[in-house]
Amino acid sequence: MSSAAAQGLGPGEVAASSGADLASSTLAAKISVTPSGGGVAFEGVTVAYKGNTVLSDFTLTVRPGEIMAVIGPSGSGKTTVLRAIAGFVRPVSGRLCAGGRDVTDLPPRARGIGMVVQNYALFPHMRVADNVAFGLRARRAPEHTVRAEVEAALSMVGMSSFASRYPRELSGGQQQRVAIARALAIRPELLLLDEPLSALDAQIRQSMLEELARLHRSLPALTVLYVTHDQTEALTLADRIAILRDGKLVALGPSRELYQRPPNRFAAEFLGRANLLSVILDTPEAGEDNATVRFGATQLRARARAGIAASTSCLLCIRPHDLSLTAREPGANSLAARVREVRWKGELHDIALEAEGQALRLTTAPLRRPPEPGTMLSLYFSAADATLIPES
Amino acid sequence: MSDLAVGKTRPRRLNVPGLSAALPLAVLGILFFYPLALIIAQSFATGHGTPVFANYISVLGTALFRNALFHTITITLAASLGCIALGFTLSVVIAFVPFPGARLFARAIETFIALPTFLVALAFTFIYGSAGILNGAVMKLFGLTLPPIDFLYSAWGVILAEITVYTPFVMRPLLAAFSLIEASQIEVASILGAGWFRILRQIILPAALPALMAGGSLCLLLTTNEFGIVLFIGAKGVETLPLLVYDKAIQEFDYASACVLATINIALSLGLYALYRSALAWFSRAGLV
Ligand SMILES: Nc1ncnc2c1ncn2[C@@H]1O[C@H](COP(=O)(O)OP(=O)(O)OP(=O)(O)O)[C@@H](O)[C@H]1O
Ligand SMILES: [Mg+2]
C-alpha cells in the first residue's frame, strides 16, 4: 500500500507541499486501490468566497471508474465541489487528490481533468472539430493524432457528421454532446459534469441520460463526478450519491441504499418523495428488520437504525409507491387512513390520505375504480420498506 | 393567443415609403456632402485653358507636400499601432487580471475620451518639455546645463501624445467585448490544458476582433486628421497634411491648394480605413486571429 502511495505521489508534489506531506500521502494511499486509477479524494476541503464559507470540511472519496452523483438544492455548493477539484477556486484548507496525486497546488491545466460546465461554454468562433481538438492541440499532440482522436471522440457521441459546423448551428443536445466530446478527447481519467442535462427538455434529457450510461459502459475506467439537482438523473446514473446541504455533506451511500434507507430527513425528502410519519420507538433491539413502533394506537414493524433510543419519537419513512391498497405479503403492516384527494396522472394514481392526523401519500398503477374522498381505507406496507429516521 | 399578444406590443412604425430614407439623406447632404463637394470642386477649379489637374500637379510636385504626406502616413500608422497594442494590453489586464481598483481605472479611461486632444499635448510639454518637470529634475540631479530629454519636439513626441489621447478609443469597445466573454470559456480552456498565451490568442482575440476593428478604424481616422496635437507640440519639420491645409488656407490664402490637400487628406484617411478593414477581414478569414 505504501509503495503504491509513493508511486502515485511524485517527488515534485511532495516537495511542493512540504507542510502537508503526511496528509497528502495518506490521501494518495486512500485512492490508490489501483495504482493508475483516476479516483478523486476531497480531504477536509473548505472553500470560502470573500470570507463566506460555501463548502465546509468536505471529505469524499470517489473510486476509480465510479460514477458519483453530487446532489443538493440550489446554492448548496455542488458547483463549488467541481470548481475546487478543477482548480478554479483554491480551498482555504484541505487537500485535493486526483488520479493518485495531490493536485491541491497544481494549476487547472496540469490536472488532466475533463469537464463539462453547466452552459457548455463551447468556443463560439471555432468549428465543432476545432472545439474538440482544442485540448489536444494545447497539449501539443501531433496533428495526425489530433485528427484521429477528434474523429474518435465525435463518433463516440454520435456527432461525426457535424464536425464542420459552428456551435451556434447546433441544438442544445448537440452542443452538449460536443462539450462531452471535447472533455473526453484528452482522455482524462476523471470527468466532471455540472448539470449537463439541465438545459435540455424532458424528452431529450431522458435519451441523453441513457446515452451517458452507455458512454460510461464503453469507458469503464472513467471516473465521473456528476453534479445535478435532479434526483432521477442521480438515481439512474450513479453508483453512489452524495447529498449536499448548505455546503455540508449530509448523506453518502450507494444510490439504491440511500433511496431505500435514507439516513436523515433531508436525504429522505430530497431523494424522491417520502411519507414521514411521527412514531414512537418501542423496541430498538436485535436484528436489522426488527423494530416495533407505535403510530397512534397502531403497532407497526420497521427496519431499525442504531442510535435511536427506546420510547423516543422518531420518523418512519415510507416511499409512496411502497404503500399499497392490498396486502402484498402475509403479515404486512397495515394502517387505517382516510382518503382526502385522488389525482390521476396518466401512468399512475396519486392518492392523498390522512391517518392519525398526519398526511400520507400513496401512488399506484391506475385504478379502475379509484376511492372516493372521505372513504376509510386500509394501507399495507412491508416492514422492509419502512425505515426509521431520527427526528432532527 | 400568443400571436395576438405579440401583435399588440409591437411598436407601430411610420411607414411612408421613401420618406424614411429621404429625411436622413437630406440632413446628411446639407451638413456633410455639400461642403465636401464644394471642397472637391474647388480643388479642380482652374483658369481657362489649363488642364483640370493643374492644381494637383502643382501641389503634388512640392517637397512640402511630400514631406507632409510622409509624416502623416508614418505618424498615423505608428500612433494607431501603438493605440491598438497598448489598448489591447491594458484592456486585457483590466478585464482579466484581477487587481484592486480595476473598475476605477476603466472609468478613468472613459472620462479621458472627453478631454480635448491639445490638453494632452500641453500636459506633455509640462512634463517632458525642455522646461518641463522631468528635464528640470534630471538637470538638477546631474548638474546639467542643457535639458537632456528632447524627444517631445520630434515625430516621436507627436506619436506618443496621439497614443495617449486615442488609446481609450480602442479600449472602450474592447472592454465592452471582453465583458461579454464568459468566464467559463476561459476556465474550460485552461482545464483543457491551454496556457495564458493560447487563451489570449484563441479565445480572447477572436472575441475581440469586431471591437478591435471598430477601435482601430476610429484611431486611424482620428490620427490621420489630427490637428491640435501636431500644432501644440510644434515639432520642427514635422508637418502633416491637416497642418498644411491650415497653412495654405489661413496663412497664405491659397484656397485652391488647400482644397487639393484636403481632398487628398480625405482620400488618404478613407483609403487607410478600407485597407485596415480588408486586412483584418483577411486575417480572420485565414484563421490567423
Ligand atoms: N464567485 C462567487 N463569489 C461569491 N459567492 C459565490 C461565488 N460562486 C458561488 N458563490 C456562492 O456559493 C454558494 C454555492 O454556490 P454553487 O454555485 O456551488 O451552488 P450550486 O449548488 O452549484 O447551485 P446551483 O444548483 O444553483 O447551480 C452559493 O451561495 C453562491 O452564492
Ligand atoms: Mg451549480
Image (spheres, rainbow, N blue to C red):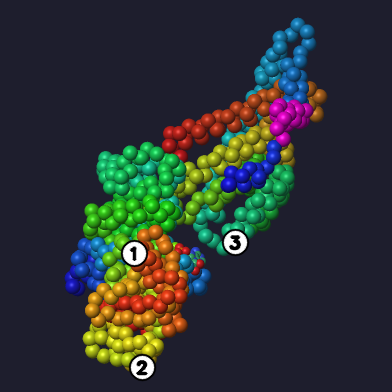
**Main SS class of the magenta portion in the image:** helix
Query: Which region shows up in magenta?
Result: B14-32
Residue A7 lies, in percent from the top left, at 21, 66
Q: Earlier in the sequence, mark 1 or mark 2?
A: 2
Measure how far apart labels 2 and 3 are at the Cα level. 63 Å
Query: What mark, if any, has residue B101 been given in the picture?
Result: 3
Q: Nearer the viewer, mark 2 or mark 3?
A: 2
Measure how far apart labels 3 and 1 are at the Cα level. 63 Å
Q: Callout 1: helix, strand or loop?
A: loop
In what quadrant of the picture does the N terminus of chain A appear?
Answer: bottom left
Asked whether residue A12 is in view, the answer is no
The subunit letter for the residue under badge 3 reads B
- Judge left or right: residue B257 versus residue A60: right
Query: What mark, if any, has residue A311 been given in the picture?
Result: 2
Outermost residue on the bottom side: it is: A311
Q: Quadrant of residue B20?
A: top right
Q: Is residue B163 above or below residue A235?
A: above
Asked whether residue B128 is in view, the answer is yes
- Report if residue B30 lies within the magenta region: yes
* Residue at image point 26% right, 64% down: A66
| Image mark count | 3
> Dot 1 corresponds to which residue?
A365
Residue A14 lies, in percent from the top left, at 29, 69
